[in-house]
Amino acid sequence: MLGALDTYALRDFVPVTPEVWARLFERLNEQVWPWQVLFLAFMLFALWQLYHGRSRSCGLALAACWCWSGIQFQFLLHAPLNWAATPMGWAFMLEAVLVLLAGLGSGWRFSGGLRAWLGMLLIVAGTVLLPLAGPLTGRSWAAFEVAGTAPMPTAVVTLGMLLMARPLSWVTVLIPALWLVYSSVIWWVGGWLPGALPAPLAVVVLLVALTGKARSGAAE
């Protein structure tokens, strides 16, 4: 049995090829243009509202982006190629509910300090660096990934905002972090290093959230 496992490579466990994966983002842009601009504006609006302490509108804007990405990317584009995309789509819808409830509930407060600076770096990565990294490293400009519609930059920007907010809950961090690990594995197999970098960042943010939860529990 162990000998048989030795014959498999990581590529054998990835449900779609990197070429097909890149084509999905081309099709996403073809189908949603020019709505990418609107949902990118939603992401930036959420950041602005968070900074000014308006957590309800921040949560609503984030929820809209996760809903849109779940429906348009996971259910309509990814699902015909991969059976796991349907539960992933429902996970995206759950994330939309979680960020909405977090914003409407006790609310977020701007964290400030080192954590806020780290969060801002993630936001810059998700809105500027990661989308540009594709075309600048040989991927097609037609597959340009925009935060608010494409899942990876949406997850990166969301984690950045969650780092900038208090309280930081592992519940809202988990789904974006898992998605980044999943998509990073696909890009790693395909040999595109920039697409693999978000995975360790996601794990770090999740560990920060879990550590904060453990400390608050110990304090109680």
Image (spheres, helix red, strand yellow):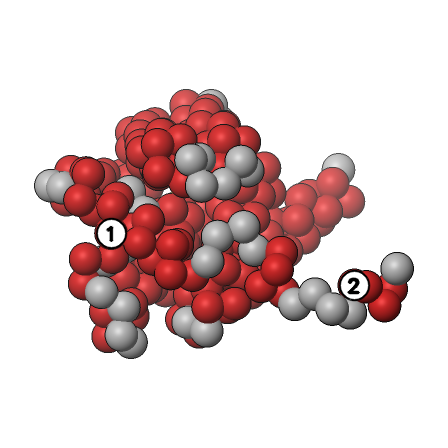
Q: Earlier in the sequence, mark 2 or mark 1?
A: 2
Give the amino acid at mark 1. Answer: Glu
Residue matched to label 2: 5
Where in the figure is residue 155, as x and y percent of width and height? Answer: 42, 48
Where in the figure is residue 148, as x and y percent of width and height? Answer: 28, 43
Judge whether 115 appears above or below 190 on screen: above
Question: Residue 50 or 122: which is nearer the viewer?
Answer: 122
Q: Secondary structure at mark 2?
A: helix
Judge whether 63 appears above or below 131 on screen: above
Mark 2 Cα shell of 10 Å, populated few (<14), some (14-19), many (≥20): few
Q: Secondary structure at mark 1?
A: helix
Question: Residue 106 or 84: which is nearer the viewer?
Answer: 84
Cα distance in 3D space between marks 2 and 1: 35 Å
Judge whether 99 appears above or below 11 on screen: above
Residue matched to label 1: 26
Judge whether 95 appears above or below 154 on screen: above
| Residue 115 in view of the camera | no
